[in-house]
Amino acid sequence: MILVKPSLEWKEQHKAYMVDWGSARMVPSSMDLSGFHTYEEYLYALEARAKGKAPWVPSSHYFLVNNDHQIVGMVDIRHKLDEFLRTIGGHIGYGILPSERNKGYATYLLKEALNKCKELHINQVLITCDEDNIGSTKVILNNGGVEDDLFITEEGQMKRRFWISVKES
Ligand SMILES: CC(C)(COP(=O)(O)OP(=O)(O)OC[C@H]1O[C@@H](n2cnc3c(N)ncnc32)[C@H](O)[C@@H]1OP(=O)(O)O)[C@@H](O)C(=O)NCCC(=O)NCCS
């Protein structure tokens, strides 16, 4: 399994992934193709986002591709924290295709994303999840997450917040 950057090569698979994802909010939202007329337009917007074009902080985006060359998950890494990310979003957002869940993919995906953080010299990585998201909580704990204070959004949603230390070798 590897992380690969979105590119034209993945256009059809990315579209199929969106269909298979269903009507739930796409996670991470940066991988949501809705609202774009063409894949090229999406890639252009993603590139702008990667460079940190306002309102975004610079970010990296990857597909998790399995040994059958199929996209099974997606992740984005925000290179720094603004107020929203420090309380609600965190450095890393990820999602696994519904049909591929409970196979250890997210645990692996986060491990690989933390290696990317190391390359980016992000030594303290913040990862958040909804208080009732048991799967994501386990994924974070599997990767050494240490819990910080809970944050309650204006809508009353409780966000659990975890830090993972990434040591540069
Ligand atoms: C949360 C999510 C990423 C987990 O992905 P996954 O590939 O199924 O996770 P893993 O297979 O690595 O599972 C990790 C652990 O969580 C457990 N788990 C996974 N989904 C679970 C669920 N819905 N309820 C309870 N436990 C769950 C697994 O059994 C495993 O437990 P273990 O470590 O004790 O063996 C996936 O369900 C998803 O994409 N959800 C929607 C988007 C989302 O919530 N993203 C995270 C935002 S913070």
Image (cartoon, grey):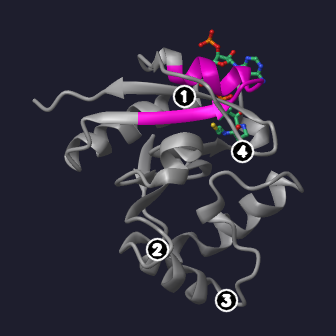
- Which residue was labeled with disc 2? 49
| Along the viewing direction, whichever of 160 and 8 lies nearer the viewer | 160
Q: Please name the residue shown 14% across and 32% down the image.
A: 168
In terms of sequence position, does the residue under pointer 4 or pointer 2 come before the other? 2
Type of amino acid at the residue the image marks with label 3: Thr
Depth check, mark 1 against mark 4: the one in front is 1
Q: Please name the residue shown 72% across and 44% down the image.
A: 97
| Along the viewing direction, whichever of 1 and 106 lies nearer the viewer | 106
The CA span between labels 3 and 2 is 17 Å
Quadrant of the frame with the C terminus:
top left
Q: Please name the residue shown 42% across and 45% down the image.
A: 2
The CA span between labels 1 and 4 is 23 Å
- In the image, which residues are magenta? 126-140
- Which residue was labeled with disc 1? 161
Depth check, mark 4 against mark 2: the one in front is 2
Residue 154 at x, y percent in the picture: 75, 45
The CA span between labels 4 and 3 is 22 Å
Type of amino acid at the residue the image marks with label 1: Arg
- Which residue was labeled with disc 4? 97
Q: Quadrant of residue 98?
A: top right
Outermost residue to the front: 154
